[in-house]
Structures are given as C-alpha cells and as structure tokens.
Image (cartoon, rainbow, N blue to C red):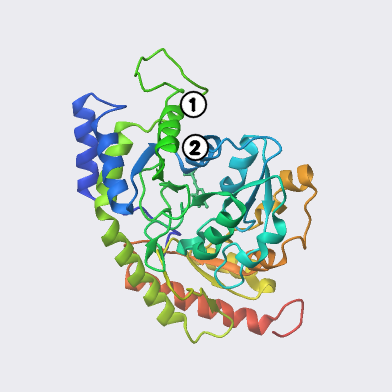
Amino acid sequence: MNVPLSQPYLDEAEIQAVTDVLRSSRLSIGPQTDAFEDLFAKTLGSKYAIAINSGTSGLHLAVRALGLKAGDEVITTPFSFIASSNCVLFEGATPVFVDVEDESLNIDPAKIEAAITPNTKAIIPVHVFGQSANMTAIMDIAKRHNLYVIEDACESIMARHNGQMAGTFGDLAVYGFYPNKQMTTGEGGMIITDDDNIYRLCKSMRNQGRGDSLQWLSHARLGYNYRISELTAALGVVQTQKLPEIIEKRRAVANRYNELLQDVEGIRLLTIEEGNDHSWFVYGVRVDARVRGDLLERLNARGVQSKAYFSPCIHLQDFYREDFGYKEGDYPIAEQISHEMLVLPFFTQISEAEQQYVVKVLKEEMAQLKQVGIEGKTL
Ligand SMILES: *Cc1c(COP(=O)(O)O)cnc(C)c1O
C-alpha cells in the first residue's frame, strides 16, 4: 500500500466550474473572483475578502497595508512555515521571535511582552496545524501596547477560539490554498478584514497599485501583480461551498487516528486547548527526537508518506542564521517540537483501511526501533 501525505479533495463540481470559465473566455478579473470573495467573507464572518495568488502574497500585502518598514519590529513565532516571517523581511522590517507553548505549538502570549521594544509595531501569530493561537491574550497585549495584529490563518481555516472564528480577531488575516491545505485552488490565497482602508489598499496593491478610478494605466501607489485567475477563483467558490463538509470529514479522520494511536507507547498526540475548535490541517504525532529520523525513513520506505514538520525552525534556516546570528538553543521549545514532530498521511478522503495501514506500520517500526535501540542503547 502507498498512502500519500496529502491529497486535494476534488470532484466533478470543480472540473465543471473550471471548464465553464474556460468556455466563458473571461480568464481574469471577473465574476468568479467577486463570487469567491463574497462567499469567503460570508463564510468566515468578515466584512471584506480580497483574493490573491498565494498566501505569501497575502502576507506581503498585509505587511505593506499596515505600513511596516525598515526599523520596525514584528513579533512572531519561529515554529511555522517560513512565509509568516519572510513577509516582514520583504519590507525590510525585523522579525522578532518569541518561543511557543509546548502543547498548543503556538506563540506563547506569556513571553510576548518581554520582547516588546519602542520599535515594535505588530504581532503575527500563526494558527499552527489547525489550532487557533490564544487570541484572547494576544489581542489584550496588542491593545495595551497599541500594536497591529496580522493573523496567519493559512493552516487553520474555520478554526475557532472561544467560539469566535480564528482570523477575525486581528486587523486582518491571511489564508492560503496550496494543495495540501484544507481547501485548495492549486495556488491562491485570501485576505480578510473589517477595515475599509486595509481593504482599499490591499485591493489596489494586488492589481499594480491601480486606484479606485479603474483607469487601467493610472497607478496610485506601488503595487504588484498578485491577482488570482478566474479559473482559480471558480475552484475557490466550489471549495468554499464544501468547507463545512471538509472540516467535518477531516475531524472524523483525526478522531479515528486518535483512537487507533491513543495507547501506543512512545507516541504523543496533539493537544487541543480548552475553548478551541480545531480545523485539522495536518496530523502530527510527537516521538522521541532520537528516533524520529530513522522512523521517517522506515515509514516512507513502506509507503507511508510522512514528514518532519516544521524542521528546521525558521530561525535555524541557513539565511536566518547568517543574517541574524541565530543558533540552536535560542528558542528551545520550538526546537524540541521541531525535532519530535512527525506528520502522518492525512487528507479529507483517506480511507479507514489506509489509516489502519499507517498505524500498523507505525507500531511495527516503533517496536523494531525499540529493539535495535539508539546507538546501541536500548530505549
Ligand atoms: C501555507 C502557508 C502559507 C502560505 O503559503 P502559500 O504557498 O504562499 O500559499 C503561509 N503561512 C503558513 C503558516 C502556511 O502554512
């Protein structure tokens, strides 16, 4: 058996929607983009939604819309996909990392205030793996210190914190629709906000800085081509319609893994914080850091596609080490998690048989490794 790490959840409805766009001849800036934005804003409960061509583009526009620039510091997490911190570098501002909570994997609010300086302008919490960061505590800190908040919600669409949708706490939030995400458009992203000015700026900057006049060759400000195509937007409409179903199905898949793995020695399951509703992005388990590498090799060799997520942490990526002098030990909790985390095959339509196979192989290989031991020492 070969079980992929992830798979998009698509059927004839998406194929039909994209085909219809092709037949319409309207391939960019059209009714599908409007429909995608309207439906997305309604589904997430925001005033505005702006579709863009990737989550990374969305993060870049977010940083620019808030006017963050060289000399400004932005507090964020080292345990994330690199785009959540690179977006700060795009504008010459400085990411300042704060270590994470061991259980939620998200930025630790108790450590944020110590990192605030007179130059701090914003916080970018990332809702990692499908779990909302502690937005109650983060918004409280942001208000007291007059800081902007950009939520990187790329991994946690429809997750909730105390009943409120992740992504609706801060000034704006960003989503990404790469094929491994809960919903996908191939490539694509979305910004949501309730702020009129942020909306206006993001909409203009995604389209070469054009102003509201819609004069094609009149450019009010520096902008980019971060537009989404009508084919992509059409996919987005169908996927957004399916979101509640997708989130439910993924929850059932995660619950089944939780049951199959609950008593397996040496495996630590993900913790969901009280008050949080999870939106399952990946299914990660934690194992002894000393066996993680071997285990990954053995799983992949037997058709169980697995990955070390996020490894290394952002601050330990080569160019962050070189440019900022970061080193091992700077953010010990994030580093420990990144050494232990093993992400298993997980997608909306994975079958029960596939999940059983994954767990069987995982159990067998764990037992094998236990016998062999580490560097001659029995575990
Ligand atoms: C997926 C993801 C993004 C955006 O990725 P794109 O490939 O640019 O759409 C940003 N931040 C996090 C944490 C992500 O997981």
Q: Secondary structure at mark 1?
A: loop
- Residue type at mark 2: give it: Ser
Q: Position of residue 69 (x, y in %)?
A: 64, 35
Q: Is residue 310 above or below residue 37?
A: below
Q: Quadrant of residue 331?
A: bottom right
Q: Which residue is mark 1?
A: 224
Q: Is residue 71 above or below residue 210?
A: below
Is 327 on the left-hand or right-hand side of 2?
Answer: right
- Residue type at mark 1: give it: Tyr
Q: Is residue 74 above or below residue 104?
A: above
> Is the N terminus in the top left, top right, bottom left or bottom right quadrant?
bottom left
> Is the C terminus in the top left, top right, bottom left or bottom right quadrant?
bottom right
> Mark 2 vs ligand 1: CB under 8 Å?
yes
**Sequence-wise first label, 1 or 2:** 2
Along the line of sight, the residue nearer the viewer: 192 or 302: 192
Q: Position of residue 250 (x, y in %)?
A: 35, 65
Q: Secondary structure at mark 2?
A: helix
Q: Which residue is mark 2?
A: 57
Q: Is residue 53 visible?
A: no
Along the line of sight, the residue nearer the viewer: 168 or 228: 168
Spatial CA distance of label 1 from label 2 is 9 Å
Q: Residue at x 56, y 79 (%)?
A: 267
Q: Residue at x 67, y 71 (%)?
A: 289
Q: Position of residue 366 (x, y in %)?
A: 58, 79
